[in-house]
Every structure is written in C-alpha cells, then in structure tokens.
Image (tube, helix red, strand yellow):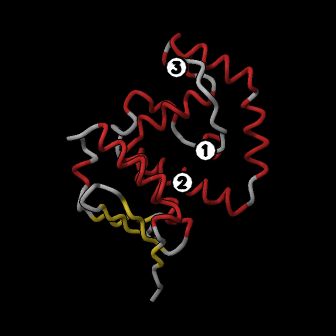
Amino acid sequence: MTQTRVFPRRFVLRAAAGTAAATMMANSGSAVASLAGQQWQLTREPGGARHLKVGWDEWAVPTVSAKDEFDVTYGVGYVQARTNAREILDIYGRARGGAAALWGPDYLAEDEFTIQLGLHTKTDLWTRAQKPKTLARVRAFCEGFNAACSENAELGGDRREILPVTPRDIDRRPTCSARG
C-alpha cells in the first residue's frame, strides 16, 4: 500500500487558494462558488497510476493531496484551469508578445513593450537556468492545467488559442503593463 502524503496549504497552495478565493469573491454566484464542499479524485497518468485528491472547503478554497510534490503541483494546475482558465490564458497570451495578432489592436502597445524588453530571449535563459526539480514542478503544473482544459472545451473561453501552456509561459517574469 502506497502512502499518500498531504502537503500543507502553505507548501504550494497559498497562491492557488488566494486566486480561487479572489475569483470567487469577484464573481459571486459563479461556478467557483459551486465547488464548495466537493471532493475530486484525479489521475495523472494514463491507466490511473498516480492518484490525487482535491477537496474544496466551504469557501471553495482547494486543498490538493497527493503522493509527492509533482502530483500536488499537477493538481494546482488542474484547479487553476478549472477556476481561472480564461484569466490565466489571457495573461500568458499577453506575456508571449503576440496578443494583438490574436485579440486585436488594443494589445499592440503591450506586445511592443514585451518585444522592447526582450522577454522572448530572457525567458529562454530563465527557463534553462531552473534546477531540474523546479522545472519538473513547472511541467507538472502545465500538464495539470492542459489536462483540465482538454477535458472541458469551455475552459478558457475566447483565449483557448494560447493552449497548450508550457514552462516558458510560467517562467516569464512579471512586467508592468503598457496599458493603463
């Protein structure tokens, strides 16, 4: 019998919980609020070799339980897609520097700013500089996010062309926006 390790919320889930709670408050009455009290069983690999659990407390804040930190991070990616896919894909699309081509001229100044900063080259450097274990966690997040989006074609709405999410998207350093 394999032992399932439950990681404390502060380990990986603080950001996920805060984002989920903020989304729930901003969209009161939304689908996120309906997740309160649910329990999910997920499998990470084909054939169900790796199991994880997601429990939602009464405030719709998720807790992910799994065997290791990679499965927990997969679960966090999955939960983020289920609760915030469109917002996350919008951010990643803008960070890639090609949002104007996808969503119109309102994003042109932001795309130009991304190019001026040289984020494409810097992102490659930052991604290569990650420790293997860190990069494995980032990949696990991406796998979870992409898995949730492939299970539900409605997740991400009008931003789905950004899929799949990759480690390069996660490793783009935050910048200030050129838009007001």
Q: Nearer the viewer, residue 173 or 124?
A: 173
Q: Position of residue 69 (x, y in %)?
A: 55, 68
Q: Quadrant of residue 58?
A: bottom left
For label 3, the residue is 102
Marks 2/3: CA distance?
24 Å
Of all residues shown, which one is farthest toward the bottom? 1
Using the image, determine if residue 157 lies above or below residue 56: above
Q: Which mark is residue 141?
A: 2
Residue 115 falls left or right of residue 35: right
Image point 76% across, 40% down: which residue?
124
Residues marked 2 and 1 touching at CB (< 8 Å) = yes
Residue type at numbered disc 3: Leu
Q: Position of residue 96 (x, y in %)?
A: 62, 29
Image point 29% across, 55% down: which residue?
60
Tell me which label, 1 or 3, sits earlier in the chain.
3
Number of the front mark, 1 or 3: 1
Q: Position of residue 22 (x, y in %)?
A: 37, 44
Dot 1 alpha-carbon crowd within 10 angstroms: few under 14, some 14 to 19, many 20 or more:
some
Tell me which label, 2 or 3, sits earlier in the chain.
3
Q: Quadrant of residue 61?
A: bottom left
For label 1, the residue is 170
Q: Nearer the viewer, residue 19 or 107?
A: 19
Q: Nearer the viewer, residue 49 or 40?
A: 40
